[in-house]
Each structure stands twice: as structure tokens, then as C-alpha cells.
Amino acid sequence: QVQLLESGGGLVQAGGSLRLSCAASGIMFSTNGMGWYRQAPGKQRELVAAITSGGRFVYVDSVKGRFAISRDNAKNTVYLQMNGLKPEDTAVYYCNADEDPYPSGVPGRYWGQGTQVTVSS
């Protein structure tokens, strides 16, 4: 059974930082691409950042230079370091995974339960 367990969300002031973690089990982590999606109220879910099994990155334009995705294959964990947070970053953040090629234009098959990030102005 595949499980993606997110942690690290919370409430932070604008300009602050948070680090999200996603611990994976039930998948061959090293051969999976990993990503972070987010969904704000009334908006569609969007891909924020992704990292392929080979370590290549993809970021949505709105977070470039502020967010950094990384992975630790020894710990089966992917991270999202978020700096310079803005109120518009407020959303539920979801961990996502699938075998490469990832990202592929559609979300991967596996999802975490989501973690709330709230940025106050």
C-alpha cells in the first residue's frame, strides 16, 4: 500500500519560511518522480515543484527563486523549502508521486493527504 505522509505545514507571517516533508512508503522511491501540488480555495490544484528520479527540477514561475525541492533517497523523503512566503502561497499542499517520466503533464497516481500552509500579511 502506497502512503505519502506530509508534515511541516502551519501558519507563518509574510516573508517567513516553512519546510514541508513527505515521507513515502510502498513505492520504489528512487525510481519515482516526486512533486508538490497546492490548491487554494476556489482555485484549481497546481503543480508547484517536481523533482525527477534523476534529480532534475521543475518549478512553477510564481515560486522560482523562493522555493526549493529536494529528495533524500536514503530516507524515502522529499522536501519543499519555502522561503519568502507570500499570502498568495496560502493553500493546501499535497505530495504527489509516480514512476518516471514525471512530471508528465498530468498528476502522478499517488497522493498524500495534504498539509495546510497559511501565510498572513
Image (tube, rainbow, N blue to C red):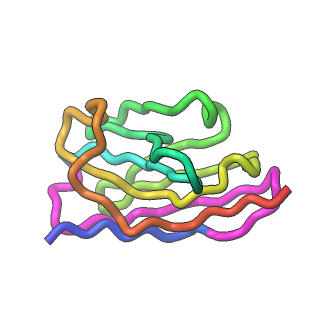
Up/down of 88 relative to 24, above or below: above
Looking at the rendered image, the quarter that the C terminus falls into is: bottom right
Q: Residue at x 37, y 60 (%)?
A: 77
Q: Residue at x 58, y 51 (%)?
A: 81
Rendering coords of residue 113 (x, y %): 38, 69
User: Looking at this view, is 53 or 63 the one in front?
Assistant: 63
Looking at the rendered image, the quarter that the N terminus falls into is: bottom left
Up/down of 103 relative to 92, above or below: above
Q: Residue at x 75, y 51 (%)?
A: 87
Rendering coords of residue 96 (x, y %): 33, 53
Rendering coords of residue 4 (x, y %): 31, 66
Horizontal side of 58 relative to 116 (left or right) equals left
* Residue 20 within the segment the image draws in magenta: yes
Rendering coords of residue 3 (x, y %): 25, 69
**In terms of image quadrants, where is residue 11?**
bottom right
How many numbered marks appear? 0
Horizontal side of 14 relative to 3 (left or right) equals right
Q: Which segment is the magenta one? A: 10-30
User: Looking at this view, is 47 or 52 the one in front?
Assistant: 47
